């Protein structure tokens, strides 16, 4: 095989919903980066906490949004796919993460973007369903195998970025494979947008 036969890795933007520097979700992103080497080129979103409170009055003209918002949108636009790893706070989506996503509703930066969603925490199911619905209604491309809840995550992912639970590693590898397929245009069954009524 020569260099021309090799498929370049998928540019993956990883977004951590936890604002803690050393969180289980950061460790999970590290694990996924290692497991997907050669498939994904992973870039971690670097300014989630810098994104200001959502205010549509600050986004009335192209290029008028705050600088941190424009940077976030540019990273989304440059990515072939997006991975969101987030905890659940008080059975809901962390406010900082939801705020960032709100800035993309009008700009449609998630529209037709392949996305994988992992909610990893003590439980996670309530926040997962809420955020999954949000991502689908803004037209993210999410396959069933590219969304996952990892409860009791602290017992399954080490601080060095290793997945220590066999079943969790199997599920994460499936998620990586599924997301790569969606990003490469494979014919994959996608989750439907939720009904508004």
Image (cartoon, helix red, strand yellow):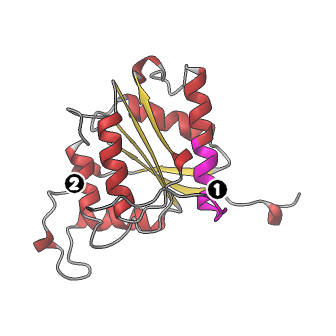
Residue extending furthest toward the bottom: 61
Return the x and y of residue 34 as percentages of the image width and height. 59, 37
Residue at the top extreme, as displayed = 155
Question: Measured along the vertical axis of the image, is residue 116 above or below residue 8?
Answer: above
Q: Residue furthest front?
A: 197
Q: Earlier in the sequence, mark 2 or mark 1?
A: 2
Picture coordinates of residue 95 (x, y %)? 20, 45
Q: Quadrant of residue 86?
A: top left
Q: On the image, numbered disc 2 is attached to which residue? A: 99
- Tag in front: 2 or 1: 1
Who is closer to the viewer here, 138 or 106? Answer: 138
The residue positioned 41% from the left and 62% from the top of the image is: 75
Residue at image location 14% in from the left, 70% down from the top? 56
Looking at the rendered image, the quarter that the C terminus falls into is: bottom left
Could you give the CA–CA distance between mark 2 and mark 1, rounded to whole angstroms?
Answer: 29 Å
Decide: few, some or many residues near mark 2? Use Cα within 10 Å; few <14, some 14-19, many ≥20: some
Q: Quadrant of the N terminus?
A: bottom right
Q: Give the percent coordinates (x, y) of residue 146.
A: 53, 47
Identify the secondary structure beneath mark 1.
Answer: helix
Look at the numbered disc 2 and give the secondary structure of its residue. Answer: helix
Q: Nearer the viewer, residue 166 or 79?
A: 166
Residue at coordinates 50% horizontally, 28% vertically from top-left? 161
Labelled disc at residue 100: none
Along the line of sight, which residue is nearer the eye, 134 or 36? 134
Tell me what residue is drawn at x 60 percent, y 21 percent.
166
Left or right: 7 with respect to 19?
A: right
Q: Is residue 180 magenta?
A: yes
Q: Which residue is mark 1?
A: 181
Q: Which residues are magenta?
A: 175-188
């Amino acid at each position: 095989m020569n260099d021309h036969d090799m498929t370049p890795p998928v540019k993956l933007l990883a977004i951590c919903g936890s604002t803690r520097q050393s969180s289980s979700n950061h460790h999970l992103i590290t694990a996924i980066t290692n497991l997907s080497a050669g498939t994904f080129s992973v870039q971690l979103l670097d300014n989630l906490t810098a994104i200001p409170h959502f205010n549509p009055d600050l986004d009335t003209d192209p290029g008028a949004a705050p600088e941190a918002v424009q940077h976030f949108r540019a990273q989304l636009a440059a990515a072939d796919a997006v991975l969101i790893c987030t905890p659940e706070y008080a059975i809901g989506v962390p406010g900082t993460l939801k705020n960032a996503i709100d800035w993309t509703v009008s700009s449609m930066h998630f529209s037709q973007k392949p996305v994988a969603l992992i909610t990893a925490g003590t439980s996670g199911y309530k926040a997962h369903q809420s955020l999954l619905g949000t991502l689908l209604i803004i037209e993210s491309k999410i396959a069933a195998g590219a969304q996952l809840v990892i409860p009791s995550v602290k017992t399954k992912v080490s601080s060095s970025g290793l997945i220590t639970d066999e079943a969790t590693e199997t599920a994460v590898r499936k998620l990586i494979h599924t997301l790569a397929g969606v990003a490469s245009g494979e014919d994959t069954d996608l989750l439907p947008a939720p009904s508004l009524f």
